[in-house]
Amino acid sequence: MQPSALRLEYYFVAELNVTANREHNPKKPMTLTDKNLVVTPGFLPDQKGPRRWQVTLRIQQQAGPAANAPYYFTIELVGFFAVAASYPKEKAEWIVRTNATSVLFSTAREVLRNAMAQGPFCPLLLPTVSFYTPETKKMLDAANRKKRKTAELPPSAAKA
């Protein structure tokens, strides 16, 4: 085992709403899927340095009555992360976008499960997900190539 290049410094729950569905019938099957979840991440580089980030993750269940969901919920977490100095600077945003969101999602799974365990129905457990997308990696790689190319130009050419 070795320490991760991404460290969660602290987090807090900014919003938590869990509502038991009074129409839920435990004898009927649920038809919930990952498509019933709206997951919205937000990324903000910290003013203290390029290796520090504030990441927000909002998860909202949007299932209709036919899904027979035992609970409806919304949760928003805010986490503060640091990227290790030994990690390549040009890959810092990529590790934040993929791993920080995964850490917050896992935390949200547990917070929601604990809140639902106090309700009248069996608690839901959010699915395991990955925030890695080749598109994000390509976008960040292209942005880094553009930054390097601009940095290589003489100052007068970069302005033109």
Image (cartoon, rainbow, N blue to C red):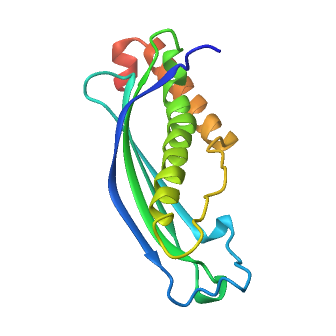
Q: Position of residue 94 (x, y in %)?
A: 55, 31
Q: Residue pushed farthest left?
A: 47
Q: Residue at x 51, y 83 (%)?
A: 21
Q: Please, is residue 150 above or below residue 35 in the view?
A: above
Q: Please, is residue 108 above or below residue 145 in the view?
A: below
Query: Left of 47 or right of it: where is 1?
Result: right
Q: Please, is residue 68 above or below residue 154 in the view?
A: below
Q: Residue at x 57, y 37 (%)?
A: 98
Q: Quadrant of the C terminus?
A: top left
Closer-to-camera residue (145/54) = 54
Q: Position of residue 105 (x, y in %)?
A: 53, 48
Q: Residue at x 34, y 14 (%)?
A: 155
Query: Left of 36 or right of it: where is 18?
Result: left
Q: Position of residue 23 (x, y in %)?
A: 55, 90
Closer-to-camera residue (47/55) = 55
Query: Left of 151 or right of it: where is 11?
Result: left
Q: Position of residue 34 (x, y in %)?
A: 66, 64
Q: Quadrant of the N terminus?
A: top right
Give the total number of marks visible in the rendering: 0
Q: Residue at x 36, y 23 (%)?
A: 50
Q: Residue pushed farthest top?
A: 86
Closer-to-camera residue (96/145) = 96
Closer-to-camera residue (152/42) = 42
